[in-house]
Amino acid sequence: MNRTFLGLCLIIVCAVIEGLAQISWKTASVQPQRSRLWITVGVVAYGSEIALYTLALTVVDVSVAFAMGSLSFVSVAVLSRLLLGEKISWMRGAGLLLILSGVAFMGGEA
């Protein structure tokens, strides 16, 4: 496994962590009795994401890393569907597929 591949994997993990952070903050807004817990989870998740993203930037060009950060949009949509039951319309799904296509092009050139 080369360093660039590891960096790209870290960016994917960061996108998933960002999705979980967003879901936890949404949960905090709809569960006020447990909002401190969910806000804390979100803050810890974002802190972890910053550390991992910084590590990824040591081996991946920032232009590639930033573009691949768009995976967070996909992560939030999928996790909100799975964990919160939110709907993904066909138009939103098409947009997510376009994001995935762009990320695949960018990651393929890394």
Image (cartoon, grey):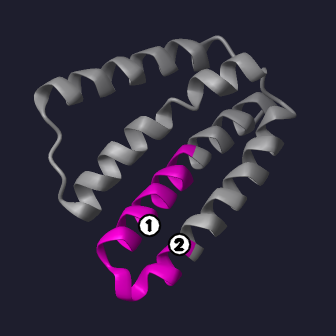
In this picture, residue 49 sits left or right of residue 92: right
Q: Position of residue 49 (x, y in %)?
A: 67, 53
Q: Which residue is mark 1?
A: 24
Q: Position of residue 84 (x, y in %)?
A: 24, 62
Q: Amino acid at mark 2?
A: Ile
**Magenta stretch, residue numbers:** 15-39
Residue 39's disc is 2
As drawn, 43 above or below 15: below
Q: Is residue 28 magenta?
A: yes
Please rate how many residues cluster around mark 2, counting C-alpha atoms within 10 Å: few if below 14, some from 14 to 19, many from 20.
some
Q: Is residue 50 magenta?
A: no
In this picture, residue 52 sits left or right of residue 104: right
Secondary structure beneath dot 2 equals helix
In front of the other: 47 or 8: 47
Residue depicted at x 13% and y 34%: 89
Contact (Cβ within 8 Å) of mark 2 with mark 1: yes
Residue depicted at x 65% and y 68%: 44
Q: In the rendered image, which quarter contains the N terminus?
A: top right
Q: Amino acid at mark 1?
A: Ser
For marks 2 and 1, give the CA distance.
Answer: 7 Å
- Identify the residue at the far bottom of this view: 33
Please rate how many residues cluster around mark 1, counting C-alpha atoms within 10 Å: few if below 14, some from 14 to 19, many from 20.
many
